[in-house]
Amino acid sequence: MLKIKDITLCLEAFAPLSLQESYDNSGLLCGNPEWEASGALLSLDCTEAVVDEAIETGFNLIIAHHPILFSGLKKITGSTYVERTLIKAIRHNIAIYACHTNLDNTKQGVNQKIAEKLGLQDLKVLLPKSGQLRKLVTFVPASHLDSLRETLFQQGAGHIGNYDSCSFTQEGTGTFRGNALSKPFLGNPMELSQEKEVRLELIYETAHEKSLLEALKNKHPYEEPAFDCYPISNNHPGIGSGMLGSFETALDEVEFLKLLKTQLKAACIRHTPLLNKVIKTVAFCGGSGRFLLNQAIARKADAFVTADFKYHDFFDVEGKLLLADPGHFETEQFTPEIFYGCILNKFPKFAIRLSKINTNPIHYF
């Protein structure tokens, strides 16, 4: 029987919690990770109605994109929908898990799903994040180089853009002397050893560091392997906010807006004045993407699709592209499909269900 933590660890392998923004609150919000998981209900939001649906289906895990517990609570009296939702979930032993901006910042996450719905290709992260990459340097006898390097590759090291198995090696001489308690792989205790070694360098994502170092220590032949972990300032091309993609065949602006409305099932789309230009390159960001406007313009996008633009924000576009705002829910509504695919791939026999509750709080008359 799977436990709650088995499911959440599956999601975190896909969208590590380390990728969430500093203001966010992703992760397990209530419930015990050691509980046996009877099934998972997948939703964009966690509301009282969604908890009721979980109760009816007999599922004790709700996985939502938006955290129901976003800022601190000083009391839980049931006076707000947040408090009532948590009270009901706790009363019925239902765990709630949120996968929010860590999924936004993952290349295979929210924005790739939008690209899939719109038919966009040649995808690139619009605003790559820094601080997500490090370099591992270690020293190993040539006889064990290949096996150690392959082990580190299997733990996620050595990925650069569209390439994997990337590393650098250089031969040199290492010196060491073990004390009386040491059990050296080469040489003898209390004697200075000089051995031919290979310097091995690999790049890796910070989210992989723990498992990577554990693998290094388990696979390395030395009792005390020497290694360094260096932070590097390179942006990660596969991690960050928003995306940029292109259509195989350009659309005129009206065709583009019609496609957007149909594919995102939007009741209406707010947009800036039409520019009488074709739409080939599109910048887009699920949810609130106002902060990416300058990046969309700088990357020469013909259109920018996102949500939550305020009245005066529309003026800031200044005719440099077509801004289209279909709505927050509309740009993120397919997020549960990502959860579904991720869990099904790892646990094909586990009970999962897409919520039937439309949690969009905005209606149009």
Image (spheres, rainbow, N blue to C red):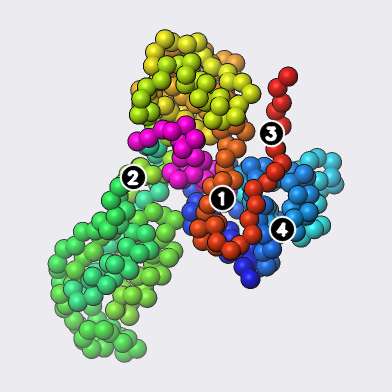
Q: Position of residue 290 (x, y in %)?
A: 52, 26
Mark 4–mark 1 distance (CA, rounded to whole Å): 15 Å
What residue is at 36 percent from the left and 73 percent from the top? 217
Image quadrant containing the C terminus:
top right
According to the picture, the residue beneath numbered tag 3 turns out to be 360
Mark sitting earlier along the chain (3/4): 4
Mark 2: few, some, or many residues within 10 Å (few <14, many ≥20)?
few
What residue is at 57 percent from the left and 43 percent from the top? 335
Q: Is residue 100 above or below residue 121?
A: below
Q: Of discs 1 and 2, which sits in the foreground?
A: 1
Mark 4: few, some, or many residues within 10 Å (few <14, many ≥20)?
many
Report helix, strand or loop for mark 1: helix
Residue type at mark 4? Phe
According to the picture, the residue beneath numbered tag 4 turns out to be 59
Q: How many marks?
A: 4
Tell me the tag on residue 233.
2
Report helix, strand or loop for mark 3: loop
Mark sitting earlier along the chain (1/2): 2
The answer, for residue 74, to whether it is visible in the render is no
Image quadrant containing the N terminus:
bottom right
Mark 1–mark 2 distance (CA, rounded to whole Å): 31 Å
Image quadrant where residue 248 sits: top left
Mark 4–mark 2 distance (CA, rounded to whole Å): 44 Å
Tell me the tag on residue 339.
1
Report helix, strand or loop for mark 2: loop
